[in-house]
Image (cartoon, rainbow, N blue to C red):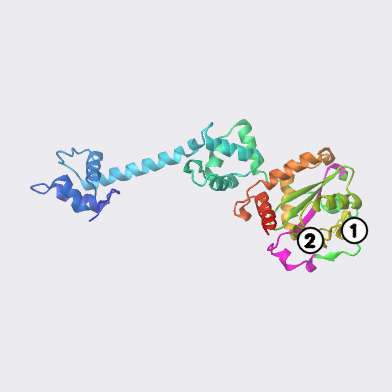
Amino acid sequence: MSESGGRLSLEDRAQLQWLLSQQPRPSLRAIAAQLGRAPSTITRELVRAGVDPKDPVGYQAARAQRLAQDNARAAGAARHAGRPLKLSPGSRLWAEVVSGLKQRHSPEQIAHRLRTDFPDDPEMRVSHETIYQALYVQGRGSLRAQVGDALRSGRARRIPRGAARAGKHAKIVGMVNISERPAEADDRAVPGHWEGDLIIGAGNQSAIGTLVERSTRFVMLLHLPNGHTAEQVEQAMTAKIMTLPEHLRRSLTWDQGSEMARHASFSLATGIPVYFCDPRSPWQRGSNENTNGLLRQYFPKSTDLSLHGPGILDNVAAELNGRPRKTLGWATPAEKLNKLLNQQNVA
């Protein structure tokens, strides 16, 4: 029988008690062999039970079992109580968690990303529950604020678009309904299909354009410093979208806002067809609506959005594109897009 160093069961302890009561008493090595355990396991068992291994008199299986169970419960409680200490200030793990929080990553995103970034380092593992407990429940000052930023959904109810934008649902000449959009865009199987929208600033006087690629969730932001008329939006979109290779320029989906009145000119300049959502149907641009909610962490409502220059917009987009996404298997949008670009270069 092979020797095992594992824990003894109640049956093992009962047999050990019986063997120790025999006359002549077998040696500990012989007892260990009969139980299929290492001699050191038997010695430790006797010591834990308060019995001298050299003179093992008075060993009681029931009492030893109770002691073992009590010790196991105490050890489990100690491990549980000690988990937050794994995130002690100054440790590498703490630094990585704080870095993620400063980038507005959620605890769940951080926990999964650590496994990707440190695959062979068990010391760089932590559950998102531990992050919540150690930083949110126990956190103070700036750390607690960082957690608040990371957990903030940014999805507070917005002013109805009809009230926010004049002529929002005016008829767009020559628009093609989303029902005509290729099936490959619907199931996100093929990259290059984009969703677009505007987030509006105070008094409907300023805006930032948002473009989100449906397959990778990659975000690009449009700088609109002088307004958001149809002509200004068309020019900004054309300049931004033409920075992409042709295979990533397949379609654009927008709502029926008057800022898209020049969609035909945009399609002529870029070769990208534009499809329009049904009125009051934001779920038809789900990726874009989600991104707009995240952007409100950076660009609160009732502020002048024209104050944010191209550099700021690029930095915010880079931060969003660097967030691990559950829907992407905890990869980031930037990683997914770079993979597509590299595949095209190889081809």
Q: Position of residue 72 (x, y in %)?
A: 35, 44
Residue labelled with disc 1: 265
- Front position in the image: 121 or 200: 121
| Highlighted range, magenta | 178-203
Name the N-terminal-most of marks 1 and 2: 2
Kindly identify which numbered label has been placed on residue 36.
none
Looking at the image, residue 183 sits to the left or right of residue 234; the answer is left
Q: Is residue 185 above or below residue 217?
A: below
Is residue 157 visible from the viewing direction of this image? no
Give the residue type at disc 2. Answer: Ser
In what element is the residue under mark 1? helix
Disc 1 versus disc 2: distance between alpha carbons? 14 Å
Query: Is the N terminus in the top left, top right, bottom left or bottom right quadrant?
Result: bottom left
Give the residue type at disc 1. Answer: Ser
Q: Residues within 10 Å of mark 1 (few under 14, many from 20)?
A: some
In what element is the residue under mark 2? strand
Q: Quadrant of residue 180?
A: bottom right
Query: Going 15% across and 38% down the picture, which residue do you hit?
Result: 54
Label 1 with label 2: CB-CB less than 8 Å: no
Residue labelled with disc 2: 251
Q: Residues within 10 Å of mark 2 (few under 14, many from 20)?
A: many
Query: Going 12% across and 47% down the picture, which residue do you hit?
Result: 26
Looking at the image, residue 216 sits to the left or right of residue 134; the answer is right
